[in-house]
């Protein structure tokens, strides 16, 4: 049975989401679409001069996937908060695997909310984002 | 020794008006892999009861960037210039949003950023700037508040 915000219980895992593999083209498009022209993500010469072997993905491109994970499940109108820490760099070629678990039910401003623990991993050992969201159940 | 200009703590940037363009919003949605048409198809958005296509959950960061670009065009420093950010050692530490209302294409919103604080971490290997951005609409009020930690990796 599909879990919805109305039926979810603490410990439930929501439908996961994958994005990638992230190509240089993806990074170029994200730079243009987001206005984030930081050359560390798109200019190999700049990245090497800064001491990196290669360019790496915008953290916000992965956070956008956490956003999709939550809004796909709960609807944009029900998301109250979304936050993340960026815990590792996402290299070119990575596949970003996003997951979410319901950790708490709470009341805030007269609404019933679910707290979700969110994660993005690029392999089993490397977690790139450690996040959280609050979604309204509509009750 | 840090790089950030810590004398900017408490500074609030001038309010900048940004109009969300439909094409730019759809391009962003498709770049992040969005498959729900309310984010890129005006007909689908209107069928769902919205005035126009909707901004995805992380679009607030883009509005901050667009406001920065607008500030530069008006001869004002952008945020990173203001705090003396150094792109060769800069990392994004964290990003957090509180949502109060949805944002749609053709909305004109006001974007304003406050430099909250600076601190050191890991024995001085990291220095961190904390900033907050508020996105407000003239009639619908505060839509999104965002906080961000920007890190210089010094060690």
Image (spheres, coloured by chain):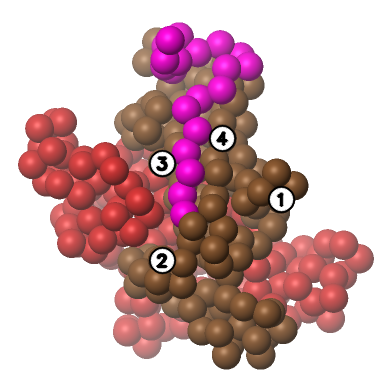
Q: CA distance from mark 4 to mark 1?
A: 14 Å
Left or right of residue B26: residue A101: right
Figure colour of chain A: brown
Label annotation for residue A126: 1
Taking depth in this image into account, of B122 and B138 the one nearest to the observer is: B122
Q: CA distance from mark 2 to mark 4?
A: 21 Å
Q: Which numbered disc flags the more N-terminal residue, 2 or 3?
A: 2
Chain given the colour red: B
Q: Which residue is mark 3?
A: A68
Q: Which residue is mark 4?
A: A99
Looking at the image, residue A72 lies above or below residue A8: below
Do the residues indicated by labels 3 and 4 lie within the same chain of the protein? yes
Q: Looking at the rendering, which quadrant does residue A5 occupy?
A: top left
Residue A52 at x, y percent in the picture: 69, 79
Taking depth in this image into account, of B114 and B91 the one nearest to the observer is: B91
Q: Looking at the rendering, which quadrant does residue B62 occupy?
A: bottom left
Q: Quadrant of the C terminus of chain B?
A: bottom right
């Amino acid at each position: 049975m599909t879990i919805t915000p109305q039926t979810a219980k603490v410990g439930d895992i929501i439908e996961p989401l994958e994005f990638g593999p992230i190509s240089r083209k993806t990074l170029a498009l994200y730079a243009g679409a987001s206005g984030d022209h930081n050359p560390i993500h798109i200019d190999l010469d700049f990245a090497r001069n800064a001491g990196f072997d290669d360019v790496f993905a915008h953290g916000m491109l992965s956070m956008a996937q956490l956003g999709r994970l939550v809004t796909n499940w709960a609807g944009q109108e029900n998301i109250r908060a979304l936050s993340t820490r960026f815990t590792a760099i996402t290299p070119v070629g990575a596949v970003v695997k996003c997951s979410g678990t319901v950790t708490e039910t709470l009341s805030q401003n007269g609404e019933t909310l679910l707290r979700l623990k969110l994660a993005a991993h690029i392999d089993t050992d490397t977690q790139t984002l450690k996040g959280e969201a609050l979604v309204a159940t509509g009750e | 020794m840090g790089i950030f200009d810590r004398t900017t703590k408490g500074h609030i940037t001038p309010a900048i008006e940004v109009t969300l363009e439909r094409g730019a919003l759809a391009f962003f949605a498709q770049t992040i892999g969005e498959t729900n048409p309310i984010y890129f198809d005006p007909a689908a958005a209107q069928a769902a009861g919205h005035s126009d296509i909707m901004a995805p959950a992380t679009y607030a960061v883009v509005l901050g960037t667009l406001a920065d670009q607008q500030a530069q065009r008006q001869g004002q420093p952008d945020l990173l210039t203001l705090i003396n950010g150094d792109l060769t050692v800069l990392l994004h530490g964290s990003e957090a949003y509180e949502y109060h209302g949805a944002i749609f294409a053709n909305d004109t919103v006001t974007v304003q950023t406050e430099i909250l604080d600076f601190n050191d971490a890991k024995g001085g290997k990291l220095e961190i700037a904390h900033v907050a951005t508020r996105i407000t609409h003239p009639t619908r009020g505060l839509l999104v508040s965002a906080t961000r930690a920007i890190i210089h990796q010094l060690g």
